[in-house]
């Protein structure tokens, strides 16, 4: 099987490994008339490399997301979610947004030191920092590398507010830090739950924790006093949209106080990767799913316009919005609107050898 031949790979989300959009060459399979059977391709191993970085905080001015600053400890993600909007970013590394995105991973070297250096800069203005805006900060390699935990340790020492987005129950490992920060109004967590059906999760997001494990994480975070929200994301027409109400009901029962959703986004190469997944796993529905997506994106696979890229437009997208709003109202989700964290507590802790200030 060549790198571009679609076919399910056990434990991986993408079914192909197409070239990134910046590559100068393309490979295409064709039948030359010679019926030669190739042995099945071996499941690719995960390769992890350190990525040297000069800075660690990313800044954005998008009106579609509720934070201006973020840190992404990792590039690529072993969870393998086929719908991940971050996949096309692997093209900047001359790697494929397909299988490479799940198996060629990079971690930010010296992330904690870089963060501390930035927070100590004169004139630094404190605003909440988000972990997980691009790839999951609690993907499987975090268990071994601990980059996310090292960042939380720095943020706690500086009393700096942080928000986290993850679909991993591994976040519970850091409940000691998160509970202390939440008690001071400095931390909140959002858990992404795409489906409650294990059989769909196994192909849609193969290496992410099971839905039940994520709901347990919601419950344990809430019991520890950490504000926790659930993201029903992404909503995919005729794949998981029938689960909206059930996901929200399970989230409310587990203790979530708020919820949000994102309509499926298919930027750049992702539209072809997702379509290949549909052809393998849901072939009878593939055309209908893509048709509904295009109806909700102004006739295209994706519309990146601010104000529309997260929600879509048209009859189907409006119906999703109405159903979501009605379910949240019925379940008393999102009644508390002020989820802002406290930025006034930020302080720069003294370093060894610093001159201490004497009390007056």
Image: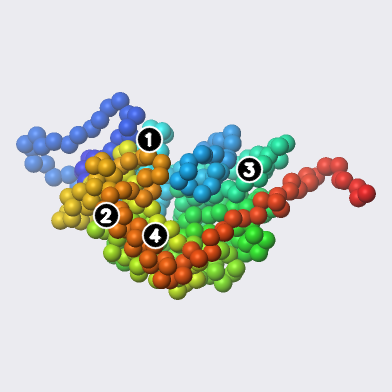
In the foreground, 43 or 199: 199
Circle 4 crowding by C-alpha within 10 Å: few under 14, some 14–19, many from 20: many
Number of the front mark, 4 or 2: 2
Circle nearer the N terminus (1, 2): 1
Residue corresponding to mark 1:
91
Q: Quadrant of residue 336?
A: bottom right
Circle nearer the N terminus (4, 2): 4
Residue 325 image position (x, y, % from top left): 39, 62
Circle nearer the N terminus (4, 3): 3
Circle 1 crowding by C-alpha within 10 Å: few under 14, some 14–19, many from 20: some
Q: How far is the residue under mark 4 from the one under mark 1?
A: 27 Å
Q: Residue at x 36, y 50 (%)?
A: 311
In the foreground, 278 or 41: 278
Circle nearer the N terminus (4, 1): 1
Residue corresponding to mark 3:
115
The kind of secondary structure element at disc 4 is strand
Answer with left or right where residue 133 lies relative to residue 300: right
Residue corresponding to mark 4:
232
Please give the label number shown on residue 316.
2
Residues tagged 4 and 2 counted as in contact (Cβ below 8 A): no
Number of the front mark, 1 or 2: 2
């Amino acid at each position: 099987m060549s790198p571009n031949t679609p076919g399910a790979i056990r434990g991986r989300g993408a079914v192909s490994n197409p070239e990134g959009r910046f590559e100068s060459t393309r490979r295409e399979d064709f039948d030359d008339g010679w019926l030669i059977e190739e042995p099945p391709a071996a499941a690719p191993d995960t390769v992890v490399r350190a990525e040297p970085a000069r800075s660690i905080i990313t800044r954005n001015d998008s009106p579609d997301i509720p934070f201006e600053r973020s840190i992404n400890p990792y590039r690529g993600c072993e969870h393998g979610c086929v719908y991940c909007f971050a996949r096309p970013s692997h093209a900047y590394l001359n790697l494929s947004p397909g299988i490479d995105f799940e198996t060629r991973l990079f971690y930010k070297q010296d992330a904690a030191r870089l963060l501390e250096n930035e927070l100590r800069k004169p004139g630094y203005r404190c605003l909440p920092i988000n972990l997980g805006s691009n790839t999951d900060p609690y993907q499987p390699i975090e268990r071994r590398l601990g980059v996310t935990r090292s960042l939380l340790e720095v943020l706690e020492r500086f009393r700096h507010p942080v928000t986290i987005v993850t679909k991993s129950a591994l976040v519970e490992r850091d409940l000691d830090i998160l509970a202390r920060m939440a008690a001071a109004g400095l931390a909140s967590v959002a858990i992404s739950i795409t489906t409650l059906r294990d059989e769909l999760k196994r192909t849609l997001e193969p290496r992410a924790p099971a839905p039940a494990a994520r709901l347990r994480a919601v419950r344990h975070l809430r019991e520890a006093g950490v504000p926790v929200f659930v993201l029903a994301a992404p909503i995919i027409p005729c794949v998981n949209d029938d689960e909206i109400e059930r996901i929200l009901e399970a989230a409310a029962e587990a203790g979530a106080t708020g919820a949000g959703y994102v309509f499926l986004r298919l930027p750049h190469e992702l539209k072809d990767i997702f379509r290949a997944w549909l052809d393998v796993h849901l072939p009878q529905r593939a055309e209908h799913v893509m048709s509904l997506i295009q109806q909700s994106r102004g006739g295209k696979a994706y519309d990146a316009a601010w104000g529309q890229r997260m929600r879509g437009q048209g009859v189907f997208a409006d119906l999703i919005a109405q159903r979501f709003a009605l379910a949240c109202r019925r379940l008393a989700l999102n009644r508390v609107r002020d989820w802002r964290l406290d930025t006034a507590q930020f302080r720069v802790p003294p370093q060894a050898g610093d001159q201490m200030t004497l009390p007056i």
